[in-house]
Amino acid sequence: MTEKRRKALKTVLKAAIVVSAALGAASFVADYGFWLSPAWARVTYAIQVGVVATFVVYQIATAALSRRPLKYAHGHKVEFALVALVLLEAILAIFESGLLLRLGTAIGVDRVAPLSVVLVQSLMILGFAAGAFRLNGKLLGSRVKPARVFVGGFAALVFLGTGALMLPKATVSGSINFVDALFTATSAVCVTGLITVDTATYFTPLGKSIILALFQLGALGVMAFTTFFALFLSGGLGIRQRRMIRNLLPIEQTRSAMTTLRRIVLVTIGAEAIGATLVFFGSRDAYPDDVTALFSSVFHAVSAFCNAGFSLFSENLAHPAIRDNELFAGVVAALIVLGGLGYPTVLSIVQFKRRSRRRGTRGRLSLQSKIVLTTTAALIVLGAVAFAALEWNGALSGKDAGAKLFAALFQSITARTAGFNTVDIGSFGVAASLATIALMFVGASPGGTGGGLKTTTAAIGALGVWRHLRGGGSVELWGREIDRDSIHDATMKIAVSVGVLFIGVFALALFESAPFLDLVFEAFSAFATVGLSRGVTPELSAPGKLAIVALMFVGRVGVLAFAYTLVPSRPRELRRLPSETISTQ
């Protein structure tokens, strides 16, 4: 075969798979998102079978047309494994022994599509993801600002989630207005937890699953998630791309991006699986059946580790069936802390322990990890003491002393990042509300699943002010000097955050009539992606909801990353102008 004919056939195959993928995606959305008549259900089924056949033909033909078929197959292991499974299912179907049909009979499902159709639907998701991931890899190596790729990825996920939540099968009523869908999707992707409609009663199991997927992806970070799968599906990224990744992900070590991102995903899945198991066995009696208990356990465990604050109870964790379940709350609190510490810190602790065991001596934690751990512990303790002292006879009344202390500790943990609550936040006094605002503003740690200033930013800012008051000089801690760039970034982030919050509060005050404290509380909760509210979220007007959406998005991607996407960069000038001292007193 001539090279010209080979290229022409490859072009035809690529066009066929693109059209097939588009039709398959449309049928997938129609099948799972809309209520179809029997006639249309048959149409979508036929399209899905056609997509299967096109996929198999494409993979086999592309391999045959390549100069080195075995090498091509080796580089596309996932695709050819699925081809093998599809062919196996087709053979078994001839003898009426389809694997998925047997599974359907075993679990009591009346209508189960052949395994090949389910596999191709899974493949469509992986295929679209792989294409986006490879495009993401190309963007990382191009002249496009990495911050713009990062922010753009979050924005794309928000709008994709908005469309998914507007599917008729996603809501109990069959519809949701655009602003509420956008608000819910943004809150999920930005792991905030603020809601304008009740997650427990407004959404169907499909809608709840979409929300679960959104805050899982949002917590992992679009860049971490896409880069991991780009490495998995396409064999790795280049040196420059990996450097770009490390600029976006606060990784302390210079290990390969693939190793780091694999560990991130494994830590996430492992922690969530352990948490879900403990929650399930600790709360199964609160549910009508084990299936409901299992889904709820997974939902709350993922929501806790992701610091998302979404709950399947209308009263959040203040629901009568679980508000006094200390195992449930304890597991949730532990997951919140672990997720909020940040991947760099967790990985640093693991490596610290491994080095200590290997060498038989005590290793050294990085300065960032020490700051994160110390600041986190201090904030948890101080917050718990403040809540216990301020609300002992208020929101915490009606409990015994031990339950009050546990509730105060839980609220201190969740106030910085997660947004769960076991007591009524609206009943907090002014002092406790201000303490909550302060904790929310600090937020989680770098590389963590929460928002806010970050513990390192708050610590560096406080140390810088203290050093300046004592006469200036370098900022030193534990025998290390914090570099000036870190101090400059922390100062700038604090200043820009205050400015963004001022604009957000001003917008809410302009459009809403709620008490000012409630609006300030709402703005800080949205910007810090916490999700606590004094009850005003469902009552917001459309402009107020959009203002909260903007605050959640900017707070999640980071004020500096967002600013970098808007402000054009310019080459650094080497010339220096004469300086003058300006009075600031």
Image (cartoon, helix red, strand yellow):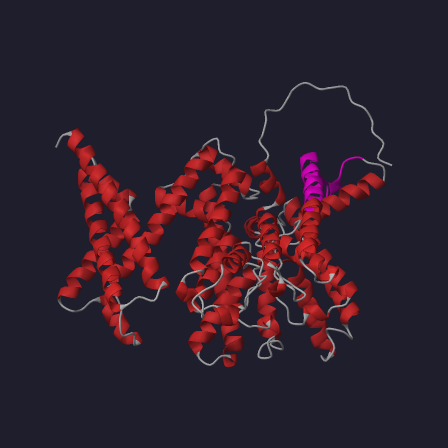
Magenta-drawn stretch contains 491: yes
Residue 108 drawn above or below residue 6 = below
Q: Residue at x 72, y 80 (%)?
A: 398
Q: Residue extending furthest right?
A: 585
Residue 390 occupies quadrant: bottom right
Residue in front for this viewpoint, 525 or 367:
525
Does residue 435 show up?
no
Q: Residue at x 15, y 32 (%)?
A: 5
Q: Residue at x 51, y 37 (%)?
A: 146
Image quarter of the C terminus? top right
- Tell me: 16 left or right of 582: left
- Tell me: 333 left or right of 179: right
Magenta-drawn stretch contains 369: no
- Magenta range is 473-497
Q: Residue 525: horizontal and vertical position, in percent?
A: 65, 57
Residue in front for this viewpoint, 170 or 475:
170
Q: Residue 460: horizontal and vertical position, in percent?
A: 72, 44
Residue 542 occupies quadrant: bottom right
Does residue 38 show up?
yes
Residue in front for this viewpoint, 475 or 417:
417
Q: Residue 321: horizontal and vertical position, in percent?
A: 57, 79
- Tell me: 50 left or right of 457: left
Image quarter of the N terminus? top left
Q: Residue 304: horizontal and vertical position, in percent?
A: 56, 63
Residue in front for this viewpoint, 528 or 269:
528
Number of numbered markers: 0
